[in-house]
Image (cartoon, rainbow, N blue to C red):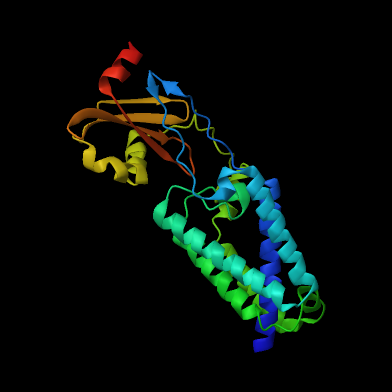
């Protein structure tokens, strides 16, 4: 049973690496459609990404190719160097995902290309940890992936199916993939374009107050009542008075009105300059 479990990990890791390779090479993140300025107020720029997978298309392609090579190597050889390289790759991925969750909760990990655009959650961290454990377990597996496929038996099939089900349960990318096909999870209707979707103000405030952008600026906001609220396209803008280093400022929050994966951006502006820009 132990040997079957070890062999199954080789097959699982090869499948995951090849799936990640395919996603990075074929699926790109969908850019948000937002103007540079609205009513004279600059639209906050997307936050900087810590993940090189998101910053550079060339880096994403390079990592994808590397993952594909590792996945194919796991299928055709049982050499220890391949297993060690796979273990190191998953351990590094676990560290990166953990750092993103703590340091940049607004950034996706890019683990599966544009499908991994959502902020990193506990499921993604747990998934990376489990894959690292699987890689460690695979170090002692006697068979290569193709040999496991040819003669793995019922035990390997049962364990592989169970691990794939766990992997699916821990993967938010599945809902993103369904959304790209125009059908939100659990619905039989096409997703409504964000610029035409009804978005109650209560929904906007709930999204805002639950965002890292609000947490970042909450201590400088001087009033619970916003100075102005308006909607433009796929965004609702909420302006609050603020005081920074003794100076009067304004914090402009841009809250997405999309049905799924709503994001929040923020920027500090000078009230006099923003007023003169509007006038």
In this rendering, the answer to whether 225 lies above or below 76 is above
Which residue is at 69% across, 60% downward?
67
Which image quarter is the N terminus in? bottom right
With respect to residue 91, does 50 lie above or below?
above
Seen from the viewer's position, the closer of residues 170 and 81 is 81
Q: Residue 15: x percent and y percent?
A: 70, 65
**Residue reaching furthest bottom?**
1
Left or right of 60? Residue 117 is left
Q: Percent from the top left, x then y, of residue 62?
A: 68, 51
- Against 136, residue 271 (above or below) is above
Q: Residue at coordinates 66% horizontally, 64% vertically from top-left?
A: 16
Residue nearest the observer in this picture, 148 or 244:
244
Answer yes or no: is residue 247 visible: yes
Which one is in front, 213 or 210?
213
**Residue 139 sits in quarter:** bottom right
Whether residue 211 is visible, yes or no, is: no
Tell me residue 111's x, y (percent). Answer: 59, 55
Outermost residue on the top side: it is 279
Where residue 92 sits in the image (x, y, percent)? 55, 64
The mark total stands at 0
Quadrant where the C terminus sits is top left
Q: Residue at x 36, y 37 (%)?
A: 204
* Side of 74 where 87 appears, left or right: left
């Amino acid at each position: 049973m132990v040997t079957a479990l070890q062999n199954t990990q080789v097959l699982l890791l090869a499948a995951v690496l090849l799936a990640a390779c395919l996603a990075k090479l074929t699926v790109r993140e969908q850019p948000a459609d937002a103007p540079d300025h609205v009513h004279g107020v600059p639209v906050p720029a997307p936050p900087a990404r810590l993940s090189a997978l998101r910053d550079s298309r060339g880096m994403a392609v390079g990592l994808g190719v590397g993952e594909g090579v590792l996945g194919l190597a796991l299928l055709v050889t049982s050499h220890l160097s391949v297993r060690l390289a796979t273990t190191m790759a998953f351990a590094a991925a676990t560290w990166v995902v953990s750092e993103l969750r703590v340091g940049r909760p607004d950034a996706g990990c890019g683990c599966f290309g544009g499908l991994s655009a959502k902020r990193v959650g506990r499921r993604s961290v747990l998934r990376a940890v489990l894959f690292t454990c699987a890689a460690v377990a695979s170090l002692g597996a006697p068979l290569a992936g193709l040999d496991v496929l040819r003669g793995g038996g019922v035990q390997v099939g049962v364990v592989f199916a169970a691990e794939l089900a766990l992997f699916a349960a821990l993967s938010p990318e599945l809902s993103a993939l369904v959304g790209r096909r125009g059908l939100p999870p659990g619905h039989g209707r096409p997703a409504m374009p964000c610029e035409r979707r009804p978005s109650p103000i209560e929904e906007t405030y709930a999204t805002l107050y639950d965002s890292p952008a609000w947490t970042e600026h909450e201590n400088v906001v001087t009033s619970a009542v916003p100075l102005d609220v308006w909607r433009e396209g796929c965004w609702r803008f909420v302006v609050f008075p603020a005081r920074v280093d003794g100076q009067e400022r304004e914090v402009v929050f841009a809250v997405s009105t999309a049905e799924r994966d709503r994001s929040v951006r923020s920027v500090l502006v000078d009230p006099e300059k923003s007023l003169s820009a509007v006038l």
